[in-house]
Image: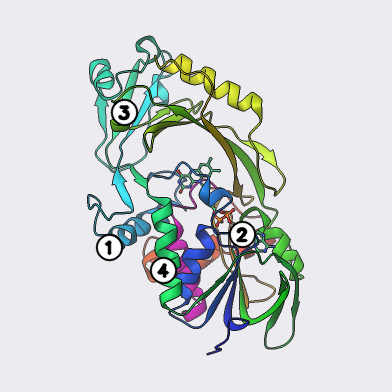
Amino acid sequence: VNQSGNNTDFLVVGAGIAGLATAAELCELGTVTVLEAESGPAQHASGRSAAVFIDWYGGKLVQPFTRISRTWFEAFSGGFEASTGILSPRGLLLVADYGDEKLLIIPTGNRIEKLSRTEVLGLVPRLREGTVSEALYDPSVADINVPKLIALHERRIRTRSGCQINGARVTRITRNKQSWTVEAGNDTFSASVLVNCAGPWADEIGMLAGLAPIELSSLRRTVCIFKAEDSSVGKWPLVHDAKGRFYFKPYSGFLLASPDDEIPSAALDAQPDERDVARTVSIIKKATTLAVNGPVDRWAGLRTFSPDCGLVLGPDPQDHAFMWCAGLGGVGIQTSPAAAMCIASFIDTGDILPELARTGITGRSVSPERFLNADCVGP
Ligand SMILES: Cc1cc2nc3c(=O)[nH]c(=O)nc-3n(C[C@H](O)[C@H](O)[C@H](O)COP(=O)(O)OP(=O)(O)OC[C@H]3O[C@@H](n4cnc5c(N)ncnc54)[C@H](O)[C@@H]3O)c2cc1C
């Protein structure tokens, strides 16, 4: 076991949710240093999400990760209803406009309720009546307290003698037989295993290490925060349009709304486009009776996808001492505990996490190796 912060067993690049969760797991297996380019953790996608947990979201290859993560979230924070919890009940209302009723499908074994229009308005009194024909309600959907989750991982890393270095942008990676040498900020680090948790920049890190890129693609999504101006807002569920044109939910005394946009972007510090902000304002005006003007805050973040939209977890086929934890798309927060445990399992046993294997997920189905052949199929 290596001891100093500059010379460790594992170097994790990126302190978003993927990097922090993975580093906290790896602290069980050896010494860990996390290198983050920004002045603090979670300044990109991980600090800009809608912070929702939906266990049926993301397709068959993602759902087992989400379910295993739910067990972790609940065990780690005292249960679903606990005040210390990272998950708290929110519920999801999937609403269909007239003519869109056939889009009301929730692919889950959960208890889903079909609500009458009166019940819908009971839940969300400021929903504009003429815009909802039918709705489904899933009570299992939860809010994720992301700041609490980040703080929990940082505490786990600290108490297990891990080292987290902010303001350390990785600019050069070289390799000798035993270890990686990484230049970041004004310092040099070395480790036997490099873990790539750089979100939209993960291909860049792979190429710095002399490896083939996955060909990840990033899509920008806009979020606007509105004054709630109605005391009932805090109790509303997440409202999602069945046609995928918008969602909104309560957010710390305010209303968070997104136009569900997916604008291709390079890996960068995403900024909201004023046209997407204006569209969000008009969506909220159309869908609700709230008298919204401009948002009080707005931001944009990148959701980063692999070519088949599945997670990319595991050793690089060219160099097994380089681990990928990338392509977390729109599910990176809710799947992060299982993704991190999966990386630790690959490092510890050379195999996928047994709980995942029992659901039919194979090392191959998440491996970066699948992109070397043309036979990959989407989830
Ligand atoms: C609007 C929006 C809503 C979302 N809603 C949800 C949701 O409700 N539920 C959910 O589960 N997921 C959601 N997501 C997706 C989720 O936010 C992402 O999947 C997740 O945050 C990805 O985490 P990450 O750690 O891989 O990437 P990031 O958070 O982008 O972290 C990557 C880190 O790597 C660092 N880095 C990059 N290059 C270098 C370098 N050279 N050297 C050092 N550090 C480097 C970056 O600075 C960054 O901190 C949403 C995303 C968006 C944008």
* Disc on res. 155: 4
Query: What is the secondary structure assignment of the residue under circle 4?
Result: helix
Q: Position of residue 238 (x, y in %)?
A: 37, 33
Inspect the image, locate mark 2, and give the three-letter code of the amino acid beneath it: Ser
- 187 to the left or right of 366: right
Q: Which residue is mark 2?
A: 39
Q: Nearer the viewer, residue 287 or 203?
A: 287
Residue at x 57% of width, y 78% of height: 10
Going from N to C along the chain, the mark reached first, 4 or 2, is 2
Q: Which residue is mark 3?
A: 136
Residue at x 72% of width, y 88% of height: 177
Inspect the image, locate mark 4, and give the three-letter code of the amino acid beneath it: Arg
Q: Which residue is mark 1?
A: 75
Inspect the image, locate mark 1, and give the three-letter code of the amino acid beneath it: Ala
Q: Is the residue marked by circle 3 packed among few (<14), some (14-19), or many (20+) residues within 10 Å?
A: many
The span from disc 4 to disc 2 (Cα, nearest Å) is 18 Å
Inspect the image, locate mark 3, and give the three-letter code of the amino acid beneath it: Leu
